[in-house]
Image (spheres, coloured by chain):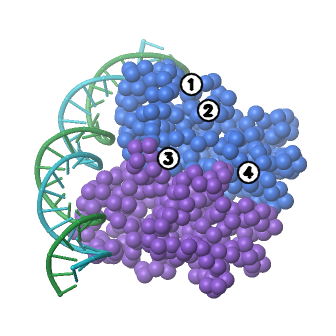
Chain colours: A purple, B blue, C cyan, D green
Amino acid sequence: MQKDRANLGISCNTCQYAHLCLAGSPTSEKEKDLLNDLLSKVLILNKGDHIYRENEKMSYLYAVKQGFCKDYCIDENGNEHIYNFYLPGDILSLDSLPYHKYTSSAIALSDAKLCMIPVDKFLDLLPTAPNLMKRFLHIMSYKMQNDRHVHKITNTKKRVAAFLINLLFRLEERKFPPNRITLPVSQFDMSNLLGMAYETVNRILHQFQSKEIIKISHKEIFVLDRKQLEDLASPYHVHGQVELV
Amino acid sequence: MQKDRANLGISCNTCQYAHLCLAGSPTSEKEKDLLNDLLSKVLILNKGDHIYRENEKMSYLYAVKQGFCKDYCIDENGNEHIYNFYLPGDILSLDSLPYHKYTSSAIALSDAKLCMIPVDKFLDLLPTAPNLMKRFLHIMSYKMQNDRHVHKITNTKKRVAAFLINLLFRLEERKFPPNRITLPVSQFDMSNLLGMAYETVNRILHQFQSKEIIKISHKEIFVLDRKQLEDLASPYHVHGQVELV
DNA sequence: CGCCGCGTTGAGATATTTCAAAAACTGTGG
DNA sequence: CCACAGTTTTTGAAATATCTCAACGCGGCG
């Protein structure tokens, strides 16, 4: 369901994730206003609702305002391949720009609110807002860099550890409770993203638990021994984006 | 060794890879001229020379004019992790923008020529060249999309097949001889990129050869049965970037 | 010629997946 | 509040894919 941002009191100026999103440094106050003028609508979703589907005409980029999402494709055998999970402040469909349609589908993992960014107008705005343009480039570049690490790891334990550390970092960056991974993501989704059997993921999580590195309760994972998890994940170093602009 | 582009008669206007690079559609003629003015130098390298190293100050983006390159990191155990191979028309270090330093190292796989793009000046130019800006965004977006597929494939045969098909597509897109993969890449580098043991890659290549899907000779791979290779690679579909702007 | 880097091959060790079945949890309706 | 159906998680054991180790071959080059 689409709603008016203004009516809901939503604006980049009051958004707690603005610094991670398009309104982050070096975007200027004036550019932020121009951006705000462009973003009139939010998309309000229930868990499981689609944001867009592969091959649909691409009209919007979506910035996560609240909740969690994933993007994925279905292959010719009907199998799902999850590419990424998206947290508040993240932007969806950055990989579809050269096409006029989405190259993957996206779905809400929880109830969610997404700011709708009309892509044509946005691209036209950028030349008049040089710092916003830089911000956008940085976001894309950062995504490239962040996406590549985990997939280079072949060992399953390391891969799971690297995934958890990366997620923890991103959650904490967004001021979620520290040392806690609260994602409405089933182990099934997680194993899909990591490209391994879900039984394997399950076994590894339990192994980590029995070593008292993590504690699993319901849908939450508490990180008890972060140092050890980081060591397990290495070679993998998390690069932050916040202060590095 | 750095040389003057003009002295060598190098310009985007005469470059056969311009349409795949920054000068590609929708960049205008006028913008191409502005771009050319910015790119005064080429870097001329011998096989094995470094282009940049991780953590070095980032001053340039590099566009491959001739030859082949790779980028990689060395982890704390001293192991190399190759992220990608770069062909003429490709741009290196797109993943390092938000940092003021390179997040990986890059090296020439053959003798090579690279156009040096002063990154600060380039970013300052973009707002005055809206179509060039779009082109740059498309290149980044395309890279994201292209990088993600192969890594999602777990099965080793499929992964090798997907890698070969992707490479073949990119080479043909650049008018290299059809159905032929000529890269100065050892099976060792290839297996590293794919994240598998080099013996495994070797065995799979031989298996493909005994099925008469490919023919390996010296450093070249001839693709004899492209259809079958594509089928093996599936689920994997190559998206082109050329006409899709 | 002989060395060196790269490619080839085999066999055993190991990691991971697959299959199968049980247990725990979730949400729904009575 | 409980029973039930559906989903997700847990666990074990066997099957398989992949890696590791080790040895050998080949071809180019000084």
Amino acid type of the residue that numbered disc 3 sits on in the rendered structure: His
Q: Nearer the viewer, mark 1 or mark 4?
A: 4
Q: Are marks 2 and 1 in contact (CB under 8 Å)?
A: yes
Q: Earlier in the sequence, mark 2 or mark 3?
A: 3
Labels 3 and 4 positioned on one and the same chain: yes
Do pointers 1 and 4 mark residues of a single chain? yes
Residue type at mark 4 is Arg
* Chain to which the residue tagged by mark 2 belongs: B
Asked whether the residues under marks 2 and 3 belong to the same chain, the reply is yes
Q: Is residue A197 left or right of residue B209?
A: left
| Residue identifier under label 2 | B171
Q: Tag 1 or tag 2, which sits nearer the N-term?
A: 2
| Total count of labels | 4
Which chain is indicated by disc 4? B
A10 left or right of B60 in image: left
Decide which of tag 1 and tag 3 comes sooner along the chain: 3
Assign a secondary structure to mark 3.
helix
